[in-house]
Image (cartoon, grey):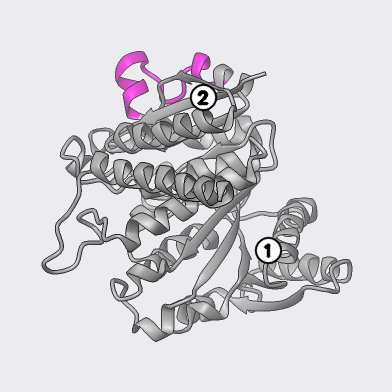
């Protein structure tokens, strides 16, 4: 049976980067014998413009019926004056709730060819390879009540977590740590927040089941400092919705650009894959967007939804090979380096993938 992939190109640069990710997936299907069936649907600002709502019922239903969802980006400033529940981003929050994915996996890697293109001294960031596990369905983003006082002079949000919510995302992080360097940093603000004290207690209790994993508890402010000074000291990190959102964007400094970062939302009915970057409407249609985050998200789709670990690793190596060969988009190009368009960068990664497979086949034939 083919794997049905619901495509949500979304807004701004979303359609451009999604197109390059789909091209890579089609190539993988061609050479691997896998079968992918793509369907395309509206979300965000594009959906508001066409249907008056950021998450049409038909989009939600198609995603729930799919084997995986690949999203581009959501958001446009023309809707900034709307109530939060009517803005494009509300469609993404509602989709996450509908799909039920509670663990957002956000890797941040310093690609060796880009070690000199980050904000760090190369020796500080070289070799950094983090996996941030962000709790996605609780905390401030979903807590009730929320809103404004009748006079508009104050606003409020609710931060709440249950033991069950913390335990399920912590288990995902512990299991990932076991497959990596067996180190887990749990991020909280337990010196101030009751929810963080609950969080720390649940992670501490769960650690007894994972005696092979070294656990450290790190306050979020100290964590931000470590990410800025010694990012390679982290392996797997687990954090609540707000802290995970902020820290994973900060981790873009490790890679050199937000455009390089992918993500996967797992644990629910259908897994959702999307680059970490936003819709960047100011550069939409110019061919400036970096498609690597979207392509790397497609690689995560291959790994977690299609069960194609080898092919996922091949796509990730192709990204590294293209960068090593000097392929750069505007966001990662250095002085004197030519910048490729979105489509040209996608083609460079595609070519690197095919060349690597041809070399591998030639080697085995000999």
Residue closest to the eye, 13 or 355: 355
In terms of secondary structure, where does tag 2 sit? Answer: strand
In the picture, measured across the screen, residue 117 lies left or right of residue 337, that is right
Crowd band around label 2 with a 10 angstrom C-alpha radius: few (<14), some (14–19), many (20+): many
Give how far across and how far down residue 236 sits, in percent: 63, 67
Quadrant housing residue 142: top right
For the question of whether residue 242 can be seen, the reply is: no
The numbered mark, 1 or 2, whose residue comes first in the sequence reads 2
Question: In the displayed structure, would residue 61 be above or below residue 32?
Answer: above
The numbered disc on residue 94 is none
Residue 58 lies within the magenta run: yes
Along the line of sight, the residue nearer the viewer: 25 or 17: 25
Query: Is 87 rendered above or below residue 209?
Result: above
Nearer the viewer's eye, disc 1 or disc 2?
2
Q: Are marks 1 and 2 in contact (CB under 8 Å)?
A: no
Q: Does residue 12 appear in this view?
A: yes
Q: Most extreme residue toward the front, as rendered? A: 366
Q: What number is the disc on residue 195?
A: 1
Identify the residue under disc 2: 6
Residue 248 lies, in percent from the top left, at 48, 61
Dot 1 lies on which element?
A: helix
Q: Is residue 356 magenta?
A: no
Q: Could you tell whether 17 is left or right of 361 in the image? A: left
Residue sitting nearer the eye, 248 or 90:
248
8 relative to 363 in the view: left or right: left
- Quarter location, residue 239: bottom right
Residue 96: image location, x then y, percent = 57, 36
Quarter of image, res 98:
top right
Residue sitting at 70 percent across and 54 percent down?
Answer: 161
Distance of label 1 from label 2 (alpha carbons): 35 Å
* Residue segment shown in magenta: 45-60
């Amino acid at each position: 049976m083919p794997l049905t992939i619901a495509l949500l190109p979304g807004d701004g640069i979303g359609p451009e980067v999604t197109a390059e990710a789909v091209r890579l997936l089609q190539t993988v299907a061609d050479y691997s014998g896998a079968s992918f069936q793509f369907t395309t649907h509206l979300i965000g600002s594009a959906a508001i413009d066409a249907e008056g709502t950021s998450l049409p019922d038909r989009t939600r239903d198609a995603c729930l019926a799919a084997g995986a969802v690949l999203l581009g980006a959501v958001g446009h400033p023309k809707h900034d004056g709307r109530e939060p529940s009517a803005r494009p981003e509300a469609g993404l929050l509602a989709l996450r709730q509908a799909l039920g994915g509670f663990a957002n996996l956000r890797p941040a890697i310093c690609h060796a060819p880009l070690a000199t293109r980050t904000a760090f001294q190369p020796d500080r960031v070289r070799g950094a390879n983090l996996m941030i596990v962000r709790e996605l369905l609780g905390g401030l983003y979903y807590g009730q009540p929320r809103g404004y006082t009748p006079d508009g002079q104050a606003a409020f949000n609710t931060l709440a977590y249950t033991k069950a919510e913390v335990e399920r995302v912590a288990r995902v992080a512990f299991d990932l740590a076991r497959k990596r360097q067996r180190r887990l940093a749990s991020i909280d603000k337990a010196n101030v927040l009751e929810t963080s004290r609950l969080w720390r207690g649940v992670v501490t209790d769960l650690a007894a089941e994972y005696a092979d994993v070294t656990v450290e508890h790190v306050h979020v402010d100290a964590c931000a400092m470590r990410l800025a000074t010694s990012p390679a000291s982290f392996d797997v990190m687990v954090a609540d919705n707000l802290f995970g959102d902020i820290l994973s964007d900060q981790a873009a400094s490790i890679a050199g650009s937000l455009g390089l970062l992918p993500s996967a939302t797992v644990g629910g009915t259908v897994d959702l894959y999307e680059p970490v970057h936003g819709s960047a409407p100011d550069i939409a249609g110019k061919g400036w967007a970096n498609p690597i985050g979207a392509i790397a998200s497609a690689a995560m789709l291959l790994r977690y939804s299609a069960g194609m670990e080898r092919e996922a690793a091949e796509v990730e190596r192709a990204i590294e090979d293209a960068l090593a060969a000097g392929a750069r988009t505007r966001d990662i190009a250095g002085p004197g380096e030519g910048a490729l368009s979105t489509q040209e960068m996608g083609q460079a990664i595609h070519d690197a993938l095919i060349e690597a497979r041809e070399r591998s086949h030639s080697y085995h034939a000999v």
